[in-house]
Amino acid sequence: MNGLGRRGTDVEPRLDHLQTKALFLALVDEALPAPQEQAVRSHLDGCEECRQGWDRYARTVERVRTVEREKAPPALASLIAGRVRRQRRFGLRGLHLAHAHHRFPVEVLIPLLLAAAVAAFLLMSS
């Protein structure tokens, strides 16, 4: 046996570029389990493209963390809190009603499709 078809539990999973980049946020927050963190770090050790991406990502996060936090004006905070309360109260129904005037009503679409099908049938049968 050449070892290519062998699957062992001691072999760490290999990550591709997209999987590695998707884990950057958890890695920078130190929220990855040890095996996943090891898999990401081993991919970064062997992949120059992902390592450069990680370096840029980590530097950006550090810069954002050093920015002084501002407090929202009371009027804005009150407006946002009111919208959150309404969202919780009405849930998805409120979201549906908020976007109802932008939708094309199905009640209009069905008769139009039916009329087109009848017209096509009449043209083909004559």
Image (cartoon, rainbow, N blue to C red):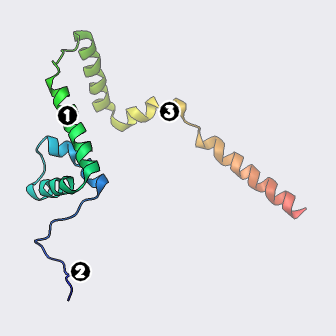
The mark nearer the N terminus, 1 or 2, is: 2
Instruction: Left or right? Give the position of 124 relative to 20.
Output: right
Q: Secondary structure at mark 3?
A: helix
Q: Looking at the picture, how far across and down is residue 85, in whole percent?
A: 26, 26
Q: Looking at the picture, how far across and down is residue 125, in whole percent?
A: 87, 64
Q: Are marks 3 and 2 in contact (CB under 8 Å)?
A: no
> Which quarter of the picture shows residue 87?
top left
- The disc placed on residue 51 is none
Q: Residue at x 43, y 35 (%)?
A: 96
Mark 2 highlights which residue? 4
Mark 3 highlights which residue? 100
Mark 1 highlights which residue? 59
As measured in the structure, the alpha-carbon distance from the residue carrying label 3 to the one carrying label 1 is 43 Å
Instruction: Left or right? Give the position of 99 relative to 36.
Output: right
Q: Looking at the picture, how far across and down is residue 120, in whole percent?
A: 80, 56
Q: Secondary structure at mark 1?
A: helix
As measured in the structure, the alpha-carbon distance from the residue carrying label 1 to the one carrying label 2 is 39 Å
Give the residue type at disc 1. Arg
